[in-house]
Amino acid sequence: MPRSDAMLMPPNKAPARTASAPARSERALVRHSSSSTRTLRAGISGLVLIGALGLAACSSDDTSSGSTAAGPTTIAPEDIKVDASVVAAGLTKLPATIASAIAAIGTPEAATKLDAIEQQWAGFEGTVRSTDPDIYLAIEDQLDPVQDQIKKGDTAAATATAATLSDLFTQYLTKYPG
């Protein structure tokens, strides 16, 4: 009678495995392994996505550094310094620009003339800020109201605020003639 491998094995041992049929515990391990691998991959993908979003958020916060790969960044007007003669010329011209905007109230040119006030001030405000912070703040405290008054069409209030601004410009030019 020929002997079979099953006969040689003790009764509590399973028959030998073949390459095509892995044991039940190995199949469970393979399934568990695949599930764990998928979970691990999903977790890593999530972390990579969160990291990328975090870096994108951080990189858009800084607008005062020179330039980025996307191009140059904008420097705030109050951070730009110019020569004292530029400040003197600007403060001398700004009252006329404000008066022109007040005179244009109710006309189609009012918005353009109003924008000219901000553009002129932005050209030298950084120097005023660094040279005399008190006068700078006083000017800033009057520029917003005069612009709002012009927008609302309040000629009388805008004229009074413009006079206050002219006095502040004169104070600055007296201290720093340029």
Image (spheres, grey):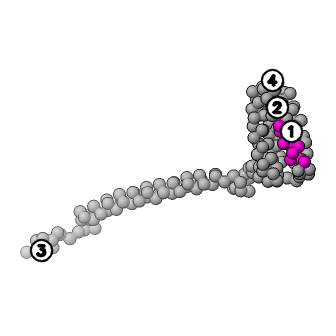
Q: CA distance from mark 3 to mark 2?
A: 110 Å
User: Which residue: 83% across, 39% down?
Assistant: 165
| Relative to 70, 86 lies left or right | right
Nearer the observer: mark 2 or 4; the answer is: 2
User: Which residue: 10% across, 71% down?
Assistant: 11
Amino acid marked by disc 4: Gly
Return the residue nearer the eye: 55 or 133: 133
Residue 164, percent from left and from top: 83, 37
Amino acid marked by disc 2: Ala
Residue located beneath label 2 in the image:
160
- Work out which residue is located at the far left of the displayed protein and give it: 1
- Give the mark, 2 or 4, whose residue is nearer the N terminus: 4
Q: CA distance from mark 2 to mark 4?
A: 18 Å
Amino acid marked by disc 1: Ser
Which image quadrant: the N terminus?
A: bottom left
Tag shown at residue 10: 3
Residue 46, percent from left and from top: 47, 54
Residue 58, percent from left and from top: 60, 54
Residue 86, percent from left and from top: 89, 49
Amino acid marked by disc 3: Pro
Tag shown at residue 166: 1
Q: What range is drawn magenta here?
A: 164-174
